[in-house]
Image: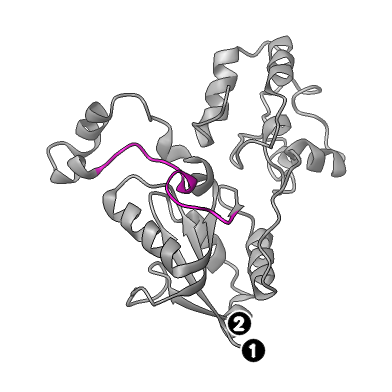
Amino acid sequence: MKKLRIAIAGLTACSGCQLSLLNCEDELPVLLEMFDFQFFPMATSPALLADEYDAALVEGCISMPHEKELLQELRRRSRYLIALGTCAACGGVAALRNGDGRELLRQQVYGHSPVADETFDPIPLQSLVKVDAVVTGCPPEKEELLRMLAGLLRGALPVGIDYPVCTECRMRENLCLLTERDALCLGPLTLGGCGARCPSLSVPCEGCRGPVPEANLVEALEVYAQKGFDRTAVIGRLRRFCPEWKL
């Protein structure tokens, strides 16, 4: 079977999504038999763009001109472009300070470096190019990445998740941290797929996988208010990983 040609790139992000793939140590020998990772700067050198790819997996949001150019090149050369992780899908932590005055932020971070003149407010991939699929998470679960790669071998894109973390919490028969423990848990509004990893350890969901489709935010805010949580605090938590939450 002909190997699929894959590009993996990281933009403005922590590289954790790419590292999650590299952490699939037991599966990597099999993956290397099925995929040709032709552009993967974090893991291979030299990192030179080829003519075309079956799929490009892109981590991170866009905040620099050279990232914009790379993303557009990968889009042009790839059959599929997949947003890898919450930053690529929603903007993520890098976009937290969007709207707070870019000039001041530039001075605080870069001082008088010429790099400061090149940065702009971080934006998710879909703001610039067509995104064929999303594997969300901060970082995505190892199993999600492997399923996504297995699907590409069949010519299939990953199917988006449409249920909240709460669904998985109940499947694991966890106590509800929000209603039974009075904790500020964002599970009702956050995409599932993580297996309720944090709530299963009695850690409230922080919303790192982004918003669940058609989330009933109005009703959820009423529940949080009944539990004594300030609306501003809840919205601040929601926007930690998805600054573009529609409120």
159 to 112, vertically: above or below: below
The answer to whether residue 185 is seen in the rendering is yes
Task: Tell me which corner region of the image, top left, top right, bottom left or bottom right, holds residue 39.
Answer: bottom left
Q: Which residues are magenta?
A: 119-133
Front residue of this view, candidates 208 and 155: 155
Determine whether label 2 and label 1 are within 8 Å by CB. yes
Residue positioned most to the bottom: 1
Determine which residue is flagged by label 2: 34
Determine which residue is flagged by label 1: 1
Give the residue type at disc 2: Met
Q: Residue at x 67, y 36 (%)?
A: 190
Residue 131 falls inside the magenta stretch? yes
Give the percent coordinates (x, y) of residue 194: 69, 48
Quadrant showing the N terminus: bottom right
- Give the total number of marks visible in the rendering: 2
- Find numbered disc 1 in the image and state the secondary structure of the residue it sits on: loop
In the displayed structure image, the side of residue 158 where residue 129 appears, left or right? left
Disc 2: CA contacts within 10 A as few (<14), some (14-19) or many (>=20)? some
Q: Residue at x 71, y 55 (%)?
A: 159
Task: Tell me which corner region of the image, top left, top right, bottom left or bottom right, holds residue 31.
Answer: bottom right
Give the residue type at disc 1: Met
The answer to whether residue 204 is seen in the rendering is no
Residue 130 falls inside the magenta stretch? yes
Give the percent coordinates (x, y) of residue 68: 34, 52
